[in-house]
């Protein structure tokens, strides 16, 4: 048995923030952001938390799949920006959607969260422990964004995407996941603290920091490498792949990956122009967009691939 995606749902905050909006308070401009990243606008949360977005995406995914919340065996939510340290956002989603029979927990794999959630669900499916799962990537990155740092604040957006998985004969063909903790400092966010009464250390506001070029170099090497590995190991030629659904971090990263793979850009759909980098939500947001445009047909072979802080990465070969 393997995991098959039977429904996708997404939810983004109402508020659209354009590049011009950002240029009002940080030294940047629309031309730079568009040409260096491909981003035109992103959604930023005014009031919606990670749980609310995640629950919204979950409800839509369940409706698309025709699955009732009580049928879910497991909910795995990938996030780096949970609303609370505990309980997990997955437990909050469980309560919000009424998935009384599911076990629910969060995982921390940054932008690879959706792919890692898929990998964990797959292991449960293969072992026969569970048969119906909800995996979610949900973020409110805006709350850990340093809005005075132009090299990071223009890149990210908030949003959530969810997929309902069912045990089936076909679906997820194979996947690969990896981590390299030695590169942890190139993209990080320390936790918030009110200080330490023993040492007298003051409060600290945990904000995201990033060495953009190091992350860029890592991604353009790792993404094609993991995809090549997956295809080779399954004896699949690139011509047999209909689409490469890559984590939406930067249009130039996607273009560089396409070039290294020797594949045409038509096979690399994108949503980065509208949503920016939504971290763990970017892959389900893109899949949902493709479904809306009727781009995916039964039997299509697609690859999904992500990378993120950790550093972490993963790729999966799916038969739609
Ligand atoms: O999910 C994973 C998350 N992170 C990523 O995927 C990030 C990967 N990295 C990137 O996408 C790119 O490295 C960035 C978009 C972050 C930066 O693009 P770049 O082409 O690597 O630019 P750079 O860092 O080399 O900066 C070039 C110039 C610098 O000015 P000087 O030193 O040449 O005068 C920056 O200060 O661009 C400047 N710059 C900006 N200018 C206007 C940096 N950010 C901005 C900005 N607006 N927002």
Image: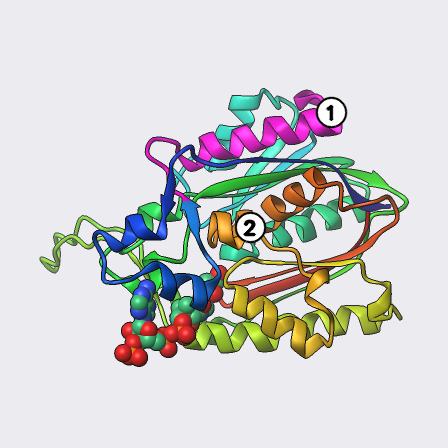
135 lies left or right of 55: right
Question: Mark 2 to mark 1: distance in Å?
Answer: 23 Å
Q: Secondary structure at mark 2?
A: helix
Q: Which residue is mark 2?
A: 282
Q: Residue at x 74, y 49 (%)?
A: 122
- Select label 2 or label 1 by which is in front: 2
Q: Are marks 2 and 1 in contact (CB under 8 Å)?
A: no
Point out residue 259 in the picture as x, y percentages from the top left corner: 66, 76
Within 8 Å of ligand 1, the CB of disc 1? Answer: no
Above or below, 6 against 255 in this view is above
Decide whether the magenta segment is chiefly helix, strand or loop.
helix
- Residue at horizontal 71 percent and vertical 75 percent from the top: 261
- The span picked out in magenta is 43-71
**Mark 1, residue position:** 67
| 252 is higher (above) or lower (below) than 270 | below
Query: Is residue 109 in view from this perspective?
Result: no
Please report whichever mark, 2 or 1, sits nearer to the chain's N-terminal start.
1
Q: Is 81 left or right of 7, judged from the image as shown?
A: left
Q: Is residue 224 magenta?
A: no
Task: Specify the color scheme.
Answer: rainbow
The relative height of residue 279 versus residue 288 in the rendered view (above or below) is: below
Q: Which mark is residue 120?
A: none
Res. 16 image quadrant: top left
CB at mark 2 closer than 8 A to ligand 1? yes
Residue 60: x %, y % from top left? 62, 28
Q: Is residue 272 left or right of residue 259?
A: left
């Amino acid at each position: 048995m393997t995991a098959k995606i039977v429904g996708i749902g997404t939810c983004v905050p109402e508020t659209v923030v354009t590049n011009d909006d950002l240029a009002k308070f940080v030294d940047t401009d629309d031309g730079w952001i568009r040409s260096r990243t491909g981003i035109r606008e992103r959604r930023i949360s005014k009031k919606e938390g990670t749980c609310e977005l995640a629950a919204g995406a979950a409800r839509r995914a369940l409706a698309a799949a025709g699955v009732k919340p009580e049928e879910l065996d497991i909910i795995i939510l990938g996030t780096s920006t949970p609303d609370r340290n505990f309980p997990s956002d997955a437990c909050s989603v469980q309560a919000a959607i009424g998935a009384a029979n599911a076990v629910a927990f969060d995982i921390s794999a940054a932008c690879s969260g959706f792919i890692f959630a898929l990998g964990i669900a797959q292991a449960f499916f293969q072992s026969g422990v569970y048969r119906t799962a909800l995996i979610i990537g949900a973020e409110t990155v805006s709350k850990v964004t340093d809005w005075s740092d132009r090299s990071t604040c223009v890149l990210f957006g908030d949003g959530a995407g969810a997929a309902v998985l069912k045990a089936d004969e076909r679906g997820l063909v194979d996947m690969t996941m990896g981590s390299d903790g030695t590169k942890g400092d190139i993209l990080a966010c320390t936790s918030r603290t009110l200080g330490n009464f023993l040492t007298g250390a003051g409060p600290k506001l945990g904000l995201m920091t990033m060495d953009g070029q190091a992350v860029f170099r890592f991604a353009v090497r790792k993404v094609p490498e993991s995809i090549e590995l997956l295809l080779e190991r399954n004896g699949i030629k690139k011509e047999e792949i209909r689409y490469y659904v890559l984590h939406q971090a930067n249009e130039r990263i996607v273009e560089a990956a396409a070039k290294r793979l020797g594949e045409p850009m038509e096979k690399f759909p994108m949503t980065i122009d509208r949503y920016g980098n939504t971290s763990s939500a970017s892959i389900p947001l893109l899949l949902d967009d493709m479904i809306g445009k009727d781009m995916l047909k039964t039997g299509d072979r697609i690859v999904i691939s992500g990378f993120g802080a950790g550093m972490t990465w993963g790729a999966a070969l799916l038969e739609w």
